Amino acid sequence: MKYRVRQALGQVFIKDKNIIEKIIRFADLTLDDAVLEIGCGEGWLSRRLSESAGSLTIVELDERWLEDTQERLSDRNNVTFVRGDILKVEFEGVSAPTFKIVANIPYYISAKIIQLIVAHCDRVSSALLMLQKEFAQKLVAGPGDALYSSLAVYTQFYFKPSLEFVISKNSFRPVPKIDSAMLLLIPRVERPMDIDPAFFSAVVQTSFWGRRKPLLSCLRKSPFLNLKPGIEALPFFEGRLAIRGELLSLSEFEQLCRALKPYTL
């Protein structure tokens, strides 16, 4: 069964079966694993996931591809199908308390899916995601890198991201304009529990809101924070009053949050 691909929904499908096998190897699945696939497309990756994991839940918005994959996997009894927008149904269809995500996600909602995974990080044991190469590079970027962003710091606060391998654009149908990459997110078990996630997010947003401006200036004028005067006297800023937010490491952002907490209004 064949349908016309709807590129408006970010639909590009893998035509290289070797890439599918490589994804399965990197997913490192066992029959004890519950897996969530976001968007099944033509169902070729779904087939291999259903054979490698104990259970598979597929969330797909496009009814045509959902029905096609249901037919293709009619011989499998470990697959649950959910028709819907992943950003609306979220992970309701996954009955397992913890699960892995393996997916070729719609690229135009990549950031929102990352935020969704973060919101449910206590249930997600790992996430292997196919993303635009540059977007994946952004999530693993570090201080001073041109691609370093608030989303990178936000993601790294919850997970250890690693870019596993790059996939040529020629491996897809239709051929997109850019290469892709598989990004692996592993929960950061040592994440500090003494830092409020909402406050951390506000501090990071503030730091990148005034990119290339001194961090102190950003904090004083922040639309995300309301701080008492006098933060320039904090030991954190000793000898580096002109430091910029995009030069801070994850651990430095955590130190900054602890230092700023008493100054919140």
Image (tube, rainbow, N blue to C red):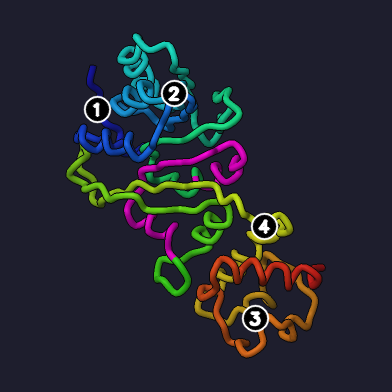
Image coordinates for residue 223, horizontal then vertical, percent: 67, 67
Looking at the image, tell me whether mark 3 or mark 1 is earlier in sequence order: 1
CA gap between label 4 and label 2 equals: 32 Å
**Mark 3, residue position:** 216
Looking at the image, tell me whether mark 4 or mark 3 is earlier in sequence order: 4
CA gap between label 3 and label 2 equals: 52 Å
**Amino acid carrying mark 4 in the image:** Pro
Residue appearing at x 55%, y 73% in the figure: 248
Horizontal arrangement in the rendering, residue 115 relative to residue 19 (left or right): right
**Amino acid carrying mark 3 in the image:** Leu
**Mark 1, residue position:** 4
Looking at the image, tell me whether mark 4 or mark 2 is earlier in sequence order: 2
Question: Which residue, as the protein is rendered here, is positioned at the far left?
Answer: 170
CA gap between label 3 and label 1 equals: 53 Å
The numbered dot on residue 192 is: 4
56, above or below 145, in the image = above
Image coordinates for residue 210, horizontal then vertical, percent: 56, 74
**Mark 2, residue position:** 31
